[in-house]
Amino acid sequence: MYQPATILPVPVFSSLCNAAFSLRREVFVQEQNVPIEEEHDAHDVTASHFVAIADGEVVGTLRLLFLPEHVKIGRVAVRKSYRGQGIARRMIGAAMAHARERGQDRFYLTAQSDKLGFYESLGFVAFGPEFMDGGMPHRAMRDYDRQSAVLVD
């Protein structure tokens, strides 16, 4: 019987967070060819990290950065064999609920351009020009001030 993944916030450098970092390398560096030096940054130390656990292993991860103007959702990754099960959607929902409990309700992210539809289904709207990040085209997206969001091409 299918058991949905458990979504948890985890402390940085805990064993679960280290498993999340390993999953990020698997997805971004090995699968998507993001340069390894671009995968981790100084924000990993101060970010709030979340994992999805299924079948006894970390199968999804993301991080939140609490910035003055908004909360940035980033480094969303799900192990290939677990995609299509709603794990990313549930992780993002849990992370946004976590931020809202702390009084934050403005969310921002940069999405790989081929994932725009997914984030639009979560209430985000793209704005600004397309740009390259990790060797892939991305768009900035937000869930606030939607009416003023303008794409620039």
Image (spheres, helix red, strand yellow):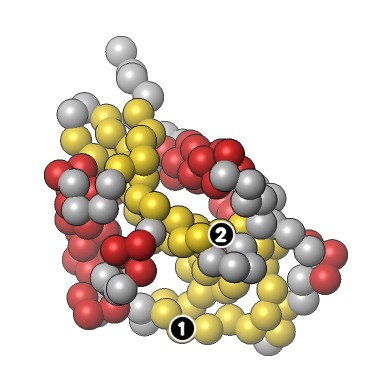
Judged from this view, the residue extending furthest toward the left is 15
Q: Is residue 65 above or below residue 16?
A: below
Judged from this view, the residue extending furthest toward the bottom is 153
Disc 2 versus disc 1: distance between alpha carbons? 21 Å
Viewer-side label of 2, 1: 2
Mark found first going from the N terminus, 2 or 1: 2
| Residue under label 1 | 132
**Residue 12: percent from the left, percent from the top?**
26, 53
**Residue 116: percent from the left, percent from the top?**
58, 61
The circle on residue 71 is 2
Amino acid under disc 2: Val
- The answer to whether one can see residue 113 in this image is no
Viewer-nearest residue: 115 or 8: 8
Viewer-nearest residue: 91 or 95: 95
**Residue at the spot x=26%, y=58% of the render?**
24
Q: Secondary structure at mark 2?
A: strand
The circle on residue 12 is none
Q: Is residue 134 above or below residue 101?
A: below
Labels in figure, total: 2
Question: On the rendered structure, is 52 left or right of 86?
Answer: left
The quadrant in which residue 28 appears is bottom left
Q: Secondary structure at mark 1?
A: strand
Q: Is residue 27 above or below residue 79?
A: below
**Residue 150: percent from the left, percent from the top?**
77, 76
**Residue at the spot x=30%, y=74% of the render?**
41
Q: Residues within 10 Å of mark 2 (few under 14, many from 20)?
A: many
Amino acid under disc 1: Met
